[in-house]
Amino acid sequence: MINLNQLPDNPYLLLTPGPLSTSKKVKAAMLRDWCTWDQDYNQLVQSIRSRLVTMASSKPDDYTTVLMQGSGSFCVESVIGSVIPRDGKLLVLSNGAYGKRMAEMAGILGIYSIVLDSGETNPVSTKQLEEVLKVDASITHVAVVHVETTTGMINPIADVARIAKSYGKTVIVDAMSSFGGIPIDIAELDVDYLISSANKCIQGVPGFGFILARKAALLTCKGLARSLSLDLYDQWETMELGNGKWRFTSPTHTVRAFDQALQELEEEGGVASRYERYKTNQETLVAGMQRMGFETLLTTDLQSPIITSFLYPDSAVFSFDEFYSRMKQEGFVIYPGKITAAATFRIGNIGDVHLVDIERLLAGMEKQLFWKTT
Ligand SMILES: *Cc1c(COP(=O)(O)O)cnc(C)c1O
């Protein structure tokens, strides 16, 4: 075991929604090589898969996990491209970049789809969903983003799933930036596919993502994929039959780091405890920034405990680039905004980020309100 104190400190803390700040133990876990088809490694993969299922579902026997190489979008594309039959039709509920991206994927893959866009500052509309499902029986799948990282909005996935299921639709949830940080029970919600990645709330490093799938749904998907390398069924079958084997080169170091990250999540007390930490971080951040005169884009009821959008201060002198570089000097990397409706920047509070870090951030920021003093 290496002495963790010998690892260099990060020059700044990432207050971004992933890749994010990870613990030294997670980074240190990558300091050895693994053979991708050796038993030691494959057992690690199987253990990760079963821990993810237990974490996500109160009925673990009904679900399975597929690990998939690439960033989160690769995993979303793998699901969109692998689970919808040729005569299927996808309905995407969108209120930001990630909802829009799912619709773009469907377009490129030649999948018939419609989008219900509620606008960036409103939650997705369950009322509209129900109206459309009532009249369009050709829809087979409904996709929604849990936390729309574009703004930090939390969408009502329980209502979406309940309505979609009452019409017999297959439900796909992009829970990229929430799984592991907000309690979710996919069995209780009746979700068929949930997608997330290594480098968000589980606090691992980038390189792969994972799909939690209802076994009964996934078993109908053989031969449906529009891509060879992103074939979800084939990837699952290889992992299942090969006992943790990946079809193509696996991100071995990242997987080992993820195993450590999962262990740290357990040590923290599981998802419920992590959720409390994130919530405290987020609430402390907003209260402190409001004291300095900042306003949030969203009202508290729509806000997730993951990332927050702040409006630019009402000042001709404010420049985000200047603010960004001053905050980086203070030891914090913040995040630009991503919406068209308003000028915003974002601050994430997930990762190896604790109340003391948020307090340090606020103290550092207090010194950098340059537009107030000029
Ligand atoms: C991060 C994220 C993704 C995936 O983004 P990648 O850059 O491909 O990892 C997808 N959906 C949401 C909601 C996200 O936050």
Image: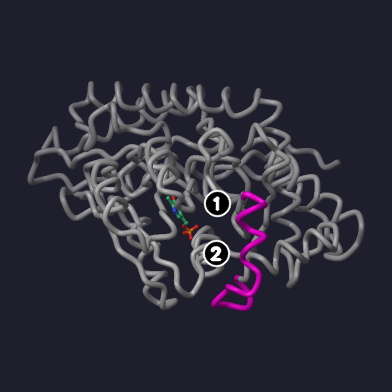
- Please tell me whether mark 2 sits on a helix, a strand or a loop: helix
Query: Hey, what amino acid is under mark 1?
Result: Tyr
- Tell me: residue 362, above or below residue 162: above
Q: Quadrant of the C terminus?
A: top left
User: Label 2 near label 1: C-beta < 8 Å?
Assistant: yes
Q: Which mark is residue 83?
A: 2
Q: Quadrant of the N terminus?
A: top right
How many C-alpha atoms fall within 10 Å of the one at disc 1: few (<14), some, or many (≥20)?
many
- Tell me: residue 98, above or below residue 28: below
- Expressed as whole percent of the image width and height from the top left, the position of residue 237 reads 75, 64
Residue found 63% across the figure and 63% down from its top: 220
- Expressed as whole percent of the image width and height from the top left, the position of residue 21 reads 55, 42
- Please tell me whether mark 1 sits on a helix, a strand or a loop: strand
Q: Which mark is residue 193?
A: 1
Query: Hey, what amino acid is under mark 2?
Result: Val
For marks 1 and 2, the one nearer the N-term is 2
- On whether residue 221 falls in the magenta region, the answer is yes
Image position of 267 (left or right of 133): right
